[in-house]
Amino acid sequence: MSGLTIEIAGLEVFAHHGVHDFERRDGQVFRFDVLLSCSSDAAGTTDDLADAVDYGAVADRVVEIATGGPYDLLEHLATLIADDLLAGFPVDQVRVRVHKPQAPLAHPFDDVTVAVERRKG
């Protein structure tokens, strides 16, 4: 058995998630990193999109879920996305990292992230 990974890094979405009223009202930028693992690399042999994971469709689905809600917690949002991708695409494993670079912290910081990983079986 061979394997393949596909990564979408830094997918940017403006959304209204957070536990504070101002986060839900004003919204903010979130970024998503998605790592998909497949047990088959058939597309590498056939050069046929029908044998591939359509990463454009994956990105569309992430954006669709991320602009839904609102959700209080990044953990919940990441889990919803990971579970949906695992169920809806021919992948064996999914890792979703949500970045919240404008998180309301009282201290200087570069980023806040939450990651969730799910596997089939």
Image (cartoon, rainbow, N blue to C red):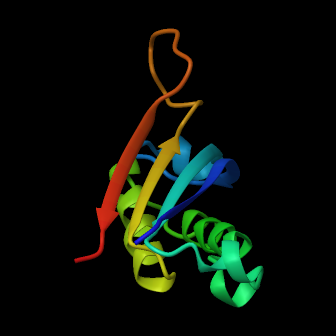
Q: Is residue 76 visible?
A: yes
Q: Locate the C terminus and report the quarter of the image it occupies.
A: bottom left
Q: Position of residue 119 (x, y in %)?
A: 30, 67
Q: Locate the N terminus and report the quarter of the image it occupies.
A: bottom left
Which of 14/63 is in front? Answer: 63
Which residue is situated farthest in the bottom direction here?
Answer: 50
Snapshot quadrant of residue 84: bottom left
Task: Look at 31% across and 63% down and name the residue there.
Answer: 118
Q: Is residue 73 visible?
A: no
Snapshot quadrant of residue 64: bottom right
Which of 19/90 is in front? Answer: 90
Q: Position of residue 74 (x, y in %)?
A: 40, 49
Task: Look at 51% across and 31% down and name the residue there.
Answer: 103
Task: Look at 35% across and 52% down and name the residue there.
Answer: 116
Vertical arrangement, residue 100 with respect to residue 69, above or below: above
Vertical arrangement, residue 101 with respect to residue 50, above or below: above
